[in-house]
């Protein structure tokens, strides 16, 4: 059976969790689909595995399971979070079934596009005499590790801050340098996956790889915009918050982009 069809089936099967709860197309289904795709690639390409690709598969499996599990835990333990999210994303009960199917297929395809640089590297194992750890894969793995650690640390710091000051915005730890450090971590992770495959991709393979990276950048910027709108509503009258948003970049440190609200095309 065609390898692409197998991976598409894996992504579709796991992402279908969104039919039970609409937001899971983008959240829990996202995390577990990434883990499932990486695990499937590991199993399907056992003869072609090298230490770099083993590391990448393990990182993506761990990342996906951690993200999916964390989101499930937060949904069950934090009712207020569910109320905030339901205000940002359409109620699944009001979304037509045909639209749900479209979202399901689109999300499953997106997750496959995002992971395809790893697939392309697995399809082109190191030739005899070629170093296992070439420059692209070293940089790629480093970015992946940094991105995953940044997400874990940011989530922990936000959780701890909300326990002590639940009604205040978070501006400590990584949040001192960027307002959405978890989104930044996500961008670093997927940039790393893309970079790892740049020397293994044929001409046509650049198209899905670039498309996957561009789309996840769009999704993260859209998420940052939703978060900014929500925080402005919650903390807009707080002078400390106003100073914070005017001095701390929203998603990329040291780049003076402080707001994305005006970019209305960022709708996800």
Image (cartoon, helix red, strand yellow):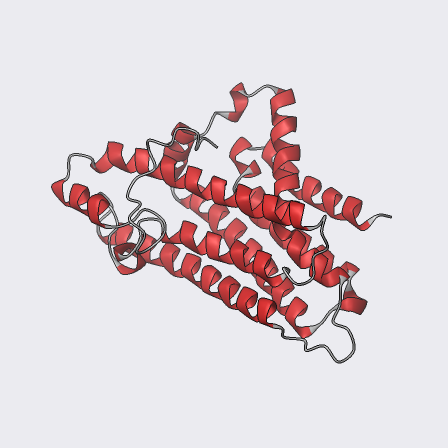
219 horizontally vs 58: left or right: left
99 horizontally vs 125: left or right: left
Relative to 235, does residue 102 appear above or below in the rendering? above
Where in the figure is residue 206, as x and y percent of width and height?
66, 50
Residue 242's quadrant in the figure?
A: top left
Relative to 215, does residue 171 appear above or below in the rendering? below
Farthest-out residue, front: 203
Residue 168 in view: no
Of residues 79 and 224, the one nearer the viewer is 224
Residue at 50%, 46% in the rendered image: 72
83 horizontally vs 249: left or right: right
Residue at 68%, 78% in the rendered image: 131
Residue at 31%, 38% in the rendered image: 228
Where in the figure is residue 254, as x and y percent of width and height?
30, 56
Residue 154 in view: yes
Farthest-out residue, right: 1
Residue at 61%, 41% in the rendered image: 110
Where in the figure is residue 35, as x and y percent of width and height?
62, 54
Of residues 19 and 215, the one nearer the viewer is 215
Farthest-out residue, bottom: 129
Relative to 171, does residue 236 appear above or below in the rendering? above
Where in the figure is residue 148, as x and y percent of width and height?
48, 60
235 horizontally vs 215: left or right: left
């Amino acid at each position: 059976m065609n390898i692409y069809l197998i991976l598409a089936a894996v992504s579709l099967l796991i992402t279908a969790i969104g039919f039970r709860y609409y937001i899971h197309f983008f959240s829990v289904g996202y995390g577990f689909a990434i883990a499932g795709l990486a695990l499937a690639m590991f199993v399907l390409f056992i003869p072609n595995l090298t230490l770099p690709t083993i590391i990448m598969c393990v990182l993506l499996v761990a990342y996906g399971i951690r993200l999916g599990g964390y989101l499930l835990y937060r949904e069950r333990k934090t009712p207020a979070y569910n109320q905030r999210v339901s205000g940002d994303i359409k109620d699944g009960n009001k979304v037509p079934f045909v639209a749900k199917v479209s979202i399901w297929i689109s999300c499953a395809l997106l997750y496959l596009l995002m992971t395809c640089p790893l697939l392309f590297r697995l399809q082109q194992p190191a030739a005899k005499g070629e170093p296992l750890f070439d420059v692209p894969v070293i940089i790629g793995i480093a970015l992946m590790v940094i991105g995953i650690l940044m997400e874990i640390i940011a989530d922990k710091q936000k959780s701890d801050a909300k326990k002590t000051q639940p009604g205040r915005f978070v501006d400590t730890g990584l949040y001192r340098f960027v307002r959405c450090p978890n989104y930044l971590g996500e961008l670093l992770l997927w940039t790393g996956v893309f970079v790892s495959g740049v020397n293994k991709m044929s001409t046509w393979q650049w198209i899905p790889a670039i498309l996957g990276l561009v789309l996840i950048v769009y999704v993260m910027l859209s998420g940052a915009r939703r978060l900014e709108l929500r925080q402005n509503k919650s903390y807009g009258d707080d002078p400390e918050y106003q100073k914070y948003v005017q001095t701390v970049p929203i998603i990329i440190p040291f780049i003076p982009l402080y707001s994305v609200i005006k970019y209305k095309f960022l709708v996800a």
